[in-house]
Amino acid sequence: MTTKQKALFIIFGGTGDLAQRKLYPSLFNLYKKGFLNENFAVIGTARRPWSNDHYQDVVRNSISGMEDTAQQANEFASHFYYQSHNVTDTNHYVTLFELAQKLDEKYQIGGNRLFYLAMSPHFFGTICEHLRSQNIVTANGYNRVIVEKPFGHDLASAIQLNDDICKFFPEEDVFRIDHYLGKEMIQNIAAVRFGNNLFKALWNNRYIDNIQITLSEALGVEERAGYYETSGCLRDMVQNHILQIVALLTMNAPVTFSDVDIRQEKISALKALQVYTPQEVKENFVRGQYTQGNGQVGYRQENQVAKDSVTETFVAGKLHVNSMSFAGVPIYVRSGKRLATKGTRIDVVFKNMPNNIFDCGQILPNVLTFNVDPIPAMSLRLNSKAVSQEGYGIEDNTLTYTHDNALRAQTPEAYEKLLLDALKGDATNFTHWQEVYYSWRFVDAIRQAWDQEKIDVETFPNYECGSMGPKAAFDLLAKDGNHWEFDPCHEG
Ligand code: NAD
């Protein structure tokens, strides 16, 4: 059902990349579908001295090609207002207050406000403080704050950032974006796990042998090298996206399918992550950096990267979730840049049959695969009889369900889904503070161990562009008698 939403968006960082590439197109889709209608307005703020007309041109540009008619795009853009605003200048909030009141009245919004902080987390505290002190929060509607990653760069800074926000906004009004949680196939994990008795029965350490999660990027650092040098793959991908996926795969069933119950179970799953000692980090985690190959330059040759940088552009690891259901099941994860292909994939590998009664044919373990990107699909590998005139052969076959072009065309983009959830106040697919806390607790132990350990300059950088990472990432599984199910370099 399309429920019309009433809201005033105040976007801090309205001229930025995120706003133009993700937020305006997502808002436009919600507008086209009727979720946003007459009763919405957007105030874009940033330091540049833009006029409303220029801002509306920028918005029209960012949705170019998506509109049915020029009039539709113009009507949409007419809801956008620009305010030149330095977030550290109190006077600018006085003007913002007045504009917000005026637009609330003009569009009959009823006091509902979404504050989207699409800028450096460094400013979150001061923005939240001013929103309260300058009365930009309302008494008659909701006041929600949406924040972007990164949420801190370690546990201590995340605690500080959270305190800075939560002094002014309660946890239930803080929506921490992890856009992976807006992806269809990530949301599908709960449907498959909690909607099928088959998997409910098998989803534990008696039947699951191991789980494998790959977030693979074909691109390098592009223009984000400055940020990436201070972050690295562990903070950029593991702390948030990968651990969120681990939580969804290993959490217990929530009592109801509501944000409170789901997030409670995710918190417990992340709390159950074994925090490694430095020795365990050595045994369970691998870091890598890309070197030139396949026509691409190495990481150290990228702009804004130090010539002797030891920043990791690749991470592989083996995680242990010490819960009743998952103790003893290795969760292998990996992510990296300049890998063989772009793709996000999850393989749940079940234990093999205890005994093979067939004398002609190998029995392979069943594998349930979620292909998240680029083409959403799900598959299940089964052993079955090979068609034959005589004899009885076994072969593996895969049942596959793929989102076809028509379905993919209808699928909302992650940001669109998440923005609508935030408008409705549904926090299911946003990260609770305690999830962030336990994720950083786990990641900090690895980061600290790595920072203490001297990297062998002879062997780092250690993987070629276009490969699937360093050899050690394959050895990590091989020493357990396992292998990556997703191996694009060796697929036929
Ligand atoms: P950006 O540099 O393109 O934009 C930053 C915005 O902040 C600009 O509008 C700039 O004018 C504004 N700004 C900076 N200082 C200001 C000040 N003192 N007062 C007022 N405005 C000020 O950055 P971005 O790529 O849009 O990213 C914004 C945030 O979102 C960052 O924290 C980033 O890590 C996060 N993020 C971005 C993406 C993405 O796809 N771009 C994805 C995930 C997370």
Image: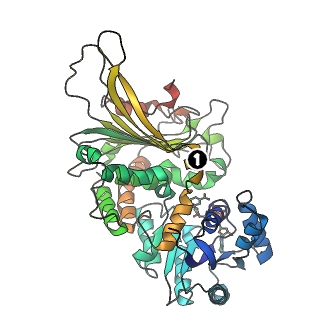
**Front-most of residues 197 and 125:** 197
**Quarter location, residue 112:** bottom right
Which residue is at 67% across, 65% downward? Answer: 16
Q: Secondary structure at mark 1?
A: helix
Q: Position of residue 418 (x, y in %)?
A: 51, 64
**In the image, what residue type sits under mark 1?**
Ala
Q: Residue furthest front?
A: 389
Q: Tell me: residue 19, above or below residue 485.
A: below
Give ligand 1's quarter of the image. Answer: bottom right
**Quarter location, residue 454:** top left
Instruction: Say left or right for 388 vs 126.
Output: left
Q: Position of residue 50 (x, y in %)?
A: 77, 75
**Quarter location, residue 461:** top right
**Front-most of residues 353 and 163:** 353
User: Callout 1 environment at 10 Å: few (<14), some (14 to 19), or many (20+)?
Assistant: few
Is residue 327 at all visible to an observer of this figure?
A: no
Is residue 370 at all visible to an observer of this figure?
A: yes
Instruction: Say left or right for 49 vs 213.
Output: right
Q: Tell me: residue 397, above or below residue 74.
A: above
Which residue is at 62% across, 60% downward? Answer: 22
- Residue at label 1? 406
